[in-house]
Image (cartoon, rainbow, N blue to C red):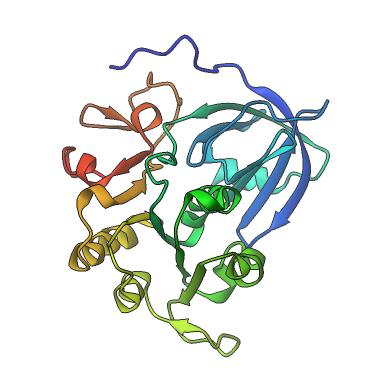
Amino acid sequence: MHKCDCESPLTPSVVEIMDIVEETSDVKTFYVKKPEGGVPFDVMPGQLAMVSHVPVGEGMFSISWQEENEYLQVAIKRVGLMTDELHRLEVGQQLGIRGPYGNGFPVEECKGKDMLFIGGGIGLAPLRSFIKYCFKHREDYGKITIVYGSRSYDDLCFKDELFEKWPKEKNTEVYVTIDNPEVCWDGHCGFVPAYVEELNVSPENTVAVTCGPPIMIKFVLESLEKMGYTDEQVITTLEMRMKCGVGKCGRCNIGSEYICLDGPVFNLAQLRELPPEW
């Protein structure tokens, strides 16, 4: 088993909730900062944090954005006891948070490339950190294409950015789909993998980054292969089964790799070297 890095943050820092944005009926984004101001640690896109709420417990979540030294954003989907309790919190209350964990997205290696982001449901949260990083460092990246889908219009996260802010960014195209037609929706209908094939973004000098439900990722990877993307051009982030964050519990290992230490970000070439458990 991997040894715990002595530099790993084991003790949570106390943070205060400064704002809560209700993205959907079961997803909220929490804006948090230290009570005296500032962030408890710096993160890179794709990294994770362990959020704790006494006496309920703690869970691992993606940091969906860090605004300089002002606050962290964590998007949390309500799926069980821990997240139910987090969704009951209000502005002004406090949480524990420790991190950052994981390797993050390869922002340096992607410089000079066109970027194709493919997300589904709450999977847009970790992608959002990389998307916003690309916008912040716009001169370092080529064309940005964002393809995102969910079951319904109400399940779409970050609507303000999807429909208002991101389409206005330089050399950027945003495509949104929902699974089935709805009266209130006049956009594209259909599943994300099929939409990706329909859009057929060229693999030339392009990196594809995807995150979403496992079944979506499975078919997106197949679609990208059909379109000519090599394994080295395809990146995904695995956020499965992480418990301790420091490689001690053994809950998140796939073969010899620990998602909390060696991931959560892998390219497809790396994943093909692992047992088919992801």
Tell me if residue 30 comes above or below residue 49 in the rendering.
Answer: below
Could you tell whether 18 is left or right of 44 in the image? right
What is the x, y in percent for residue 273? 16, 38
> Which residue is located at x 33 percent, y 62 percent?
216
**Residue drawn at the location 22% of the way across and 26% of the way down:** 256
- Give 17 or 210, whichever is nearer the viewer: 210
Along the viewing direction, whichever of 268 and 81 lies nearer the viewer: 268
Nearest to the observer: residue 92 or residue 110: 110
- Residue 138 coordinates in the image, percent (x, y): 55, 53
Q: Image quadrant for the N terminus?
A: top left
Q: Quarter holding the C terminus? A: top left
Is 234 rendered above or below residue 49? below
The answer to which image quadrant residue 220 occupies is bottom left
Residue drawn 62% across and 33% down?
Answer: 56
214 sits to left or right of 184: left
Judged left or right of residue 249, residue 132 is right
Count of marks overlaid on the render: 0
One can see residue 148 in this view: yes
Q: In the rendered image, is residue 58 in sight? A: no
Is residue 277 depicted above or below 216 in this figure? above
Q: Is residue 259 left or right of residue 227?
A: right
Q: Measured along the vertical axis of the image, is residue 18 above or below residue 120?
A: above
x then y, percent, for residue 150: 47, 69
Q: Position of residue 145 (x, y in %)?
A: 45, 65
